[in-house]
Image (spheres, rainbow, N blue to C red):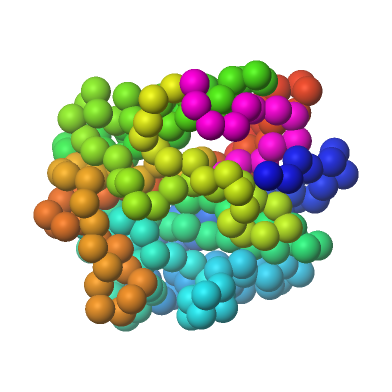
């Protein structure tokens, strides 16, 4: 596991700030009737106009810049001609490369008015992310994050997805360590300055199982319950925790 120097964290700060700004801009485009492929085009243009590359496009042959996952889609949803409808929830996951360093963030938002269950799922998932970040302390352990996320989610009757995890990030999109969203506290690598981590709870309203659609990308809940996904990239320094993907 690579610890980043302060100058590297400064570059990661630039990349992740741009991702956060881009996601906010894309989210503002979300409305009933909008095609998900148009959100992808908007995101890519936003990044390229600012001299950055979309990190996902071409990564393991992923064909788009943005992942757009709707309702029961958990992650890696492929943009398409599908038009969003009032009552949907939509996850937007975006990455970028700035001066050789990666940014990565995700959020899930409602399309118009949504059901009470959907609104609660979004709230709890976002809270779980912040609980996970709140568990990051110098001298603590990586699984403290996992435990905080799982506890909050399951207390509210939802489940965490287990086959996808958070990750380290830096000169590569996915670096060690992996960060599961479940597990006991006090295990795994010790949290030390220079660590840069993408923490990303994926939470299902039903069971935790997922399956991959025939497009070989889109992960959906096996029971077709709703799913939500929030992600922040954080840096741990001597001064504490900094959320790099916060606008």
Q: Main secondary structure of the magenta part?
A: loop
The N terminus: image quadrant: top right
Q: Is residue 189 left or right of residue 67?
A: right
- What residue is rendered at 44% in x and 48% in y? 165
Count of numbered badges drawn on the protein: 0
Work out whether residue 109 can be spotted: no
Q: Measured along the vertical axis of the image, is residue 108 above or below residue 127?
A: below
The answer to which image quadrant residue 242 occupies is top right
- What residue is rendered at 78% in x and 23% in y? 238
**Any magenta on residue 189?**
yes
The C terminus: image quadrant: top right
Residue 8 x, y percent position in the rendering: 82, 47
Most distant residue in the left direction: 223
Residue 47 x, y percent position in the rendering: 65, 67
- What residue is rendered at 43% in x and 32% in y? 146
Residue 183 x, y percent position in the rendering: 37, 31
**Any magenta on residue 128?**
no
Q: Is residue 40 left or right of residue 91?
A: right
Foreground residue among 126 and 192? 192
- What residue is rendered at 33% in x and 76% in y? 216
Q: Is residue 61 left or right of residue 37?
A: right
Q: Measured along the vertical axis of the image, is residue 118 above or below residue 102?
A: above
Most distant residue in the right direction: 7
Q: Is residue 43 left or right of residue 164?
A: right
**Span shown in magenta:** 186-198
Work out whether residue 220 can be spotted: yes
Residue 217 x, y percent position in the rendering: 36, 72
Foreground residue among 111 and 172? 172
Q: Measured along the vertical axis of the image, is residue 167 above or below residue 154?
A: below
């Amino acid at each position: 596991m690579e610890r980043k120097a302060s100058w590297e964290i400064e570059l990661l700060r630039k990349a992740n700030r741009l991702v956060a700004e881009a996601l906010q801009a894309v989210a503002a485009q979300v409305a009933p009737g909008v095609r998900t492929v148009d959100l992808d085009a908007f995101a890519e243009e936003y990044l390229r106009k600012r001299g950055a590359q979309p990190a996902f496009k071409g990564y393991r042959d992923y064909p788009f810049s943005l992942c757009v996952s709707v309702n029961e889609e958990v992650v890696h949803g492929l943009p398409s001609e599908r038009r969003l409808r009032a009552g949907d929830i939509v996850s937007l996951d975006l990455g970028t490369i700035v001066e050789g360093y990666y940014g990565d963030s995700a959020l899930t938002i409602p399309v118009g008015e949504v059901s009470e269950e959907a609104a609660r799922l979004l709230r709890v998932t976002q809270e779980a992310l912040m609980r996970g970040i709140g568990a990051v302390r110098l001298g603590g352990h990586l699984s403290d994050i996992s435990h905080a996320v799982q506890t909050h989610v399951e207390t509210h009757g939802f489940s965490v997805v287990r086959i996808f995890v958070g990750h380290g990030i830096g000169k590569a999109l996915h670096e060690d360590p992996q960060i599961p969203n479940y597990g006991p506290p006090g295990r795994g690598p010790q949290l030390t300055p220079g660590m840069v981590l993408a923490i990303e709870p994926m939470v299902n309203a039903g069971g935790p199982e997922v399956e991959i659609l025939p497009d070989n990308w889109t992960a959906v809940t096996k029971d077709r319950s709703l799913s939500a996904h929030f992600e922040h990239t954080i840096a741990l320094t001597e001064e504490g925790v900094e959320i790099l993907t916060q606008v």
